[in-house]
Image (cartoon, rainbow, N blue to C red):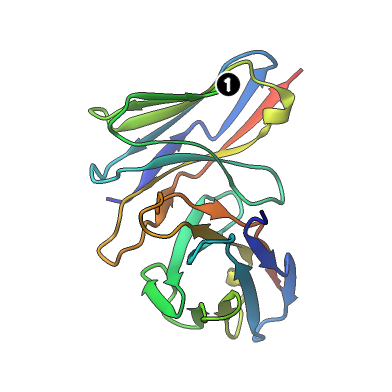
Amino acid sequence: NAGVMQNPRHLVRRRGQEARLRCSPMKGHSHVYWYRQLPEEGLKFMVYLQKENIIDESGMPKERFSAEFPKEGPSILRIQQVVRGDSAAYFCASSPPRGFLPDTQYFGPGTRLTVL
Amino acid sequence: QQQVKQSPQSLIVQKGGISIINCAYENTAFDYFPWYQQFPGKGPALLIAIRPDVSEKKEGRFTISFNKSAKQFSLHIMDSQPGDSATYFCAASIRSGAGSYQLTFGKGTKLSVIP
């Protein structure tokens, strides 16, 4: 049973470029969370999605960041016009459907974004 | 207040000893308290979790103690091993008005278990 998959594992971008991070949840999971981890810090919630719906984006920066979870394919976190401060590890977590311990979250290996 | 405060920041324990990490929270509406273990370059792995209707939960060498009145919970690692050396994060969640169970994390404790 494959766990949460994220790719790429490492991503290097120059300032002003776009970064696209992908996340495939665990089999049977239909809810995805994105978190950001700065060096020596805990994880910070960014956005929560279900298939085709953004449910809670209260942790997303107002500009340059967007997320989607289409009916088919992985969830994507998109960062436009990246700046050095975007350098961080971005983690995706998935959780089971409602009625099956919905607050339990399983994390992927993360994408480490470096902005030059 | 959505903060979760974790201590200590780093911890060195001898092999076979007990590692204790503490967390405190402000929001009494939190109703799920997991602990995650993270190795360098990896994602956090769910270790053990507790809900506020119990005061203690044990899984193998790992125990969570929960004090609802003090708004504190702690992780105890018995018979600590060098392989336990990792960063440990406490977290808390509550179902938000928007329907998400976003986790609020502590800043982490870097545990080193020395032979």
Q: Amino acid at mark 1?
A: Arg
How many numbered dots are placed on residues in this image? Answer: 1
| Relative horizontal placement of residue B114, taking residue B64 as reference (left or right) | right
> Where's residue A71, x and y in %?
51, 81
Point 55% across, 52% down: residue: A106
Point 51% across, 83% down: residue: A64
> Where's residue B76, x and y in %?
51, 23
Point 45% across, 61% down: residue: A45
Give the quarter of the figure containing the C terminus of chain B: top right
| Above or below B15: residue A3 | below
Instruction: Determine whether the residue tagged by mark 1 lies in a helix, strand or loop.
Output: loop
Specify the subunit that label 1 lies on.
B
| Relative horizontal placement of residue A47, taking residue A36 as reference (left or right) | left
> Where's residue B20, x and y in %?
51, 23
Point 69% across, 50% down: residue: B42
| Above or below B53: residue B37 | below
Could you tell me if residue B37 is visible in this image?
A: yes
| Relative horizontal placement of residue B25, taking residue A68 as reference (left or right) | left
Crowd band around label 1 with a 10 angstrom C-alpha radius: few (<14), some (14–19), many (20+): few
Q: Which of these two is toward me, B81 or A27?
A: A27
| Above or below A7: residue B68 | above
- Classify residue B51 by image quadrant: top left
Q: Which of these two is toward me, A41 or A5?
A: A5
> Where's residue A68, x and y in %?
50, 79
- Classify residue A85 by image quadrant: bottom right
Residue assigned mark 1: B61
- Residue sitting at the far top: B16
| Relative horizontal placement of residue A55, taking residue A110 as reference (left or right) | left
- Classify residue B22 by image quadrant: top left
